[in-house]
Amino acid sequence: MTKARLERFRARRVKANARERTRMHGLNDALDNLRRVMPCYSKTQKLSKIETLRLARNYIWALSEVLETGQTPEGKGFVEMLCKGLSQPTSNLVAGCLQLGPQSVLLEKHEDKSPICDSAISVHNFNYQSPGLPSPPYGHMETHLLHLKPQVFKSLGESSFGSHLPDCSTPPYEGPLTPPLSISGNFSLKQDGSPDLEKSYSFMPHYPSSSLSSGHVHSTPFQAGTPHYDVPIDMSYDSYPHHGIGTQLNTVFTE
DNA sequence: TAGGCCATCTGGTCCT
DNA sequence: AGGACCAGATGGCCTA
């Protein structure tokens, strides 16, 4: 290889590296956008990539469950759905983030009676200190309990909007907050059952029955007939080998 | 110190 | 040829 060819090769490699960096930054930006529309978003305590993907999968599943059943998710069950497959720290984070007390407050109105965002079911700046959980490192946590779009509420018979969607999403994200849903269509968002179909792992938070008051997630199946996996979260979390994000994506969507 | 997570570099493969 | 995508390797940072 002549010196000139070597230099050309080096230059090409440098350019390819730069492109790869840019590509990965784009991927990370997309992940950040995904984090922002998750039910548990914190700028300071970022979910890892793999946990973000898992939580997103659960969130989509939970929302499609709401659409399908037309039932308001019961608080504990909702948390359980979101926590399926997450690591214990993340599960604790989500649980602590979403549990407001013994009574489900999932449908509590946003405290800021903003005419624009009045429709969003969310609780902002919620600091939760659970007696059974470690001190929350997340601190100032912005929580979206159910950041549902009007069509979701319409399906629940609780819609009060027109066709205009209130923009309650975080600024940088310009895409839709909810996946394209086709209720009458030929496809279903949800697979046949729950995200934990594959029994390679199964996790149902296993806590004392006084779960909520003790800051734990009580294992109440969200959906009647949902198999009860009486497995502690920490026992069921499988540590995945260190793969690239592509592999992680594959892992998440085949789970 | 080990393990988890991440960014980056790199070479391979596929496509235009 | 060059770009996009992917996965393996590597090293840094952080935390338990």
Image: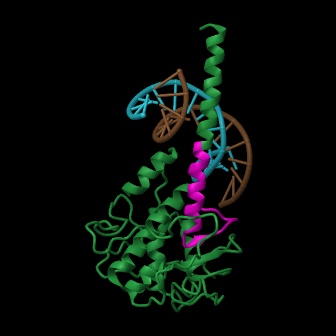
Chain colours: A green, B cyan, C brown
Please give the name of the residue rendered at 33% of the width and 71% of the height, measured from the top-left corner. Answer: A182
Q: Quadrant of residue A121?
A: bottom right
Q: Is residue A225 visible?
A: yes
Residue found at the very far front of the displayed protein: A163
Question: Considering only vertical position in the picture, is A52 above or below A39?
Answer: above
**Which quadrant is home to the C terminus of chain A?**
bottom left
What residue appears at the point 33 percent right and 78 percent down from the top-left corner? A68
Residue farthest top in this picture: A2
As drawn, A186 above or below A101: above
**Residue A89 relative to residue A148: left or right:** right
A215 in relation to A113, above or below: above
Q: Nearer the viewer, residue A55 or A228?
A: A55
Q: Residue at x 55, y 62 (%)?
A: A34
Check residue A176 for magenta coloring. Answer: no
Q: Is residue A73 visible?
A: no
Please identify the residue farthest to the bottom as the structure is shown.
Answer: A103
Residue A232 lies left or right of residue A254; in this view the side is right
Spot occupied by residue A79 in the image (x, y as percentages of width and height): 49, 77
Look at the image and say whether residue A46 sits in the magenta stretch: yes
Please count the marks in the image.
0
Q: Give left or right: position of B14 versus A217.
A: left
Q: Position of residue A248 (x, y in %)?
A: 47, 50
Quadrant of res A186: bottom left
**Residue A53 locus on image (x, y percent):** 49, 59
Q: Residue A246 appears at what percent x and percent y? A: 47, 46
Q: What is the span of residues highlighted in magenta in the rendered image?
A: A23-48
Residue at left offset 43%, top offset 74%: A81
Quadrant assignment for the N terminus of chain A: top right
Question: Which of these two is toward me, A105 or A109?
Answer: A109
Q: Is residue A209 left or right of residue A185?
A: right
